[in-house]
Amino acid sequence: MRISFDMYKLTSVELSPKLLGKVLCRRLGTEILKCRITETEAYYSQLDTACHAHKGKTNRTRVMYEEGGLAYVYLCYGIHWMLNVVTGEKDIPQAVLIRGVEGYNGPGKLTKFLNIDGNLNGENLILSDKLWIEDDNFTCSFKATKRIGIDYATDEYINKLWRFVCI
């Protein structure tokens, strides 16, 4: 069963650990690929200096300002597509980066495997027949750690334990 709209209303920090163990689903033609989410990172609001929305609303970040339940897909370093889940209330920009799924550790590896690119930016994860998240009641234990690759952020946000990994 797909996760509910109510879950997407949570903040990114609240939803990020709750997405662990959920199933990321991608339809490619007649095939549906399903991968269990094993690693996430939360990015919360314009105050979070690691968040893309930190410097305000742009064409790239506008989807982060929408109500939760949309995909935010962007190209990193001109090489790898990154899949994020927009969360929370409209006009409070926040998202959860899907960093890993079973068999594909690394956000670029999972998007390559699932053929996720910028064409899915803004996709409605609640209604889409291309990309969605399901809950099959599986749970995993997890640990919280510092986020990866955000050396440009302030110390306060570098030190937030907003990366969540199944153990």
Image: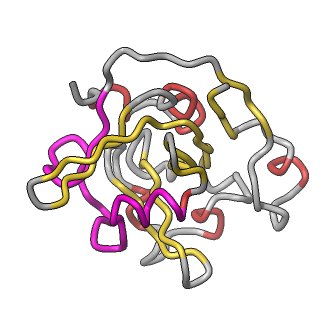
Instruction: Give the number of callouts.
Output: 0
Q: Residue at x 41, y 41 (%)?
A: 89
Residue 149 percent across, percent down from the top left: 76, 61
* Residue 163 vs residue 45, the one in the foreground: 163
- Residue 54 among magenta residues: no
For this view, does 70 lie left or right of residue 98?
left
Residue 66 percent across, percent down from the top left: 36, 54
Residue 162 lies, with reference to residue 58, above or below; the image says above
Residue 22 in view, yes or no:
yes
Magenta-colored span: 108-134
Q: Residue at x 19, y 59 (%)?
A: 28
Which corner quadrant of the image does residue 115 belong to?
A: bottom left
Residue 152 percent across, percent down from the top left: 82, 67
For this view, does 20 lie left or right of residue 36?
right
Q: Residue furthest bottom?
A: 78
Residue 97 in view, yes or no:
no
Q: Residue furthest left?
A: 30
Residue 3 percent across, percent down from the top left: 29, 28
User: In which quadrant will I find the C terminus?
Assistant: top right
- Residue 112 among magenta residues: yes
* Residue 50 vs residue 114, the one in the foreground: 114
* Residue 125 vs residue 155, the one in the foreground: 125
Residue 65 lies, with reference to residue 146, above or below; the image says below
Which corner quadrant of the image does residue 5 belong to?
A: top left
For this view, does 29 lie left or right of residue 60?
left
For this view, does 122 lie left or right of residue 104?
left
